[in-house]
Image (cartoon, grey):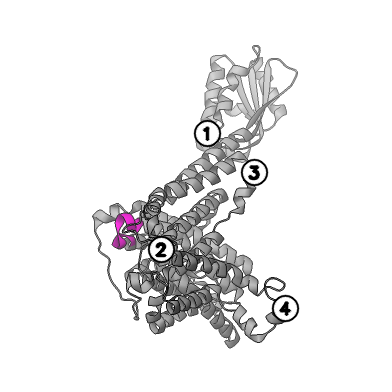
Amino acid sequence: MSRLLPTAWIKRLGLDLAPFRPRLLDDLQGYNRGRFMTDLGAGLTVGIVALPLAMAFAIASGVKPEAGLFTAIIAGFIISALGGSSVQIGGPAGAFIVIVYGIVEHYGVANLLISTVMAGMLLFVLGLFRLGVLVRYIPVSIVIGFTNGIAVLIALSQFKDLLGLSPAHMPADFVGQIRTIGAHAHQFNPFALGLGLLTVLSLWAWPRMFSPGRLLPKVVLEARTIRVASRMPAPMVVLLVLTLAAALLQLPVATIGSRFGGIPQALPQLAWPDFSWEGVRNLFIPTITIALLGAIESLLCARVADNLTDLPRHNPNQELMAQGVANMVAPFFGGIPATGTIARTVTNARAGATSPVAGMVHAVALLLIVLVAAPLAVHVPLPVLSGILLFVAWNMGEWREFIKLRHFNYTYRIILLGTFLLTVIFDLTVAVEVGLVLACVFFIYRMSTLFRIEPLAMGDPNIAVFKLYGVLFFGAVGKVEDLAEQLPSDARVVVLEAHRLISIDTSGLEALLQLRRALARKDIQLVLCEVNEQPLGLIHRAHHDDTLGSANVVKDLASALLRARQLIQ
């Protein structure tokens, strides 16, 4: 992309733009029929896994099921074709459910699409300016906190269909959902609950059924039919079996057909969402939220994929640019926000995918399924999709981290629990903002405790020598400012030995100047010695050489003591 701008302008502006080079171009070098067949099998497997998840994520987000399918098809194809990872699969994600539902609730579907497009632009800019690395600076306690909070909200949002309730309106907030579920408890449908719980139980038992020594004897596992069945994705098997059972038994439960009228058996149509500048001004926070969550999820997912394969590691900037393009294009075809999806990416990697071709095959496979089998979707029971999402929410949360909290310090606990509770009770944006503020405050406090001033005994009562340790920044300047009041009464020169002073900022430099002025009022001189390159460079750049006195900034402690004696004389 940087080649699209004149090289002279790039150099003149001092820009270091990331080149737009998809991983697909590198992976296609030396590509052969064997690798294609492997990618074809992996892509078909992921496409089957993605089908129920895409519909479930869309319905839980407050939009029609085809919006999830179109997102998985269009955004999934673009992310694989243009992304910076060999095996990452993109599409609608569980992490977006709470965010998308809240935006639809407050701003409507049209504004959701506009917000997604703007978030795509922001993601592209982040990648273009090589800012993908900034996502790694978000503390893990914040990531775990909001991930677990989103998992709780996803699970709560499914209780409506799991219990067979049919409220006219479902609020987006935690307390409102609890009240609505309680107010409509009289509509409880035991058949819906039975289907949902059976779905969760089946998803849990399916992989364990084919593990040696677990549920089935080894002789049965060696049968060819069983080996073939073990390779089938659990969500698709459960969806097909329980949909067929519900249709044959004519269970009185809500289905995609009864609520949405089915899924269009056609290609997605290009449509322009209603646009107004007045509406755009209100979408700033939703846009930032979608972009931030999309960047975090996609890059975390790419890092997981790197650990599952021996393929080259992902390019975070290229990945963000691909996510940006996908989110700019998908909404014009009725799509919702898309990002990297861990479950489908892990499935793709374990299926042996060798290149982004597998992700492109997964999108094409989904498209063919929609064109051929869309009419059958009307029979899919909504409690089954709720059960699938409950299982996704359970696997999404890192619940063991709550048990491990006792092993960590109180700052880690406060940030993780605070982010978790704020995500559940308020929203993700507030949780991340407060979490980052808390992390910064605790980091400043921790760094300030690492800065120390220790006295050194030199045997001369007229010379007070102190050794500085750590980083002198705005959070630690109080220790320097108080130094003038802690001196012996007969001190006439203060020597600061700064060999272990790593760096200072402008607030730290100002604190040294204030110390010098406070000492001067008492007729006491200040001498600095063994000042490192960074602090010395800041003193030079700020033109305070003369303020401190060039003769009073010396190379070592011996020279400082000599200078102190000269000043006393």
Q: Quick one: SS at disc 4?
A: helix
Residue with the mark numbered 4: 218
Residue with the mark numbered 1: 474
**Distance from label 2 to label 3 (Cα)?**
39 Å
Q: Residue furthest right?
A: 459
Residue occupying image coordinates x 46% and y 46%: 422
Residue with the mark numbered 3: 406
Residue type of the residue flagged with mark 3: Arg
Select label 4 or label 3 by which is in front.
4
| Mark before the other along the chain sequence, 1 or 4 | 4
Residue situated in front as seen by the camera: 545 or 59: 59
**Distance from label 1 to label 2 (Cα)?**
57 Å
Select label 2 or label 4 by which is in front.
2
* Quadrant of the frame with the C terminus: top right
**Distance from label 2 to label 4 (Cα)?**
40 Å
**Distance from label 1 to label 3 (Cα)?**
32 Å
Residue 126 colored magenta?
no
Residue type of the residue flagged with mark 4: Lys
Select label 1 or label 3 by which is in front.
3
Select label 2 or label 3 by which is in front.
2
**Distance from label 4 to label 3 (Cα)?**
41 Å
Residue 2 in view: no
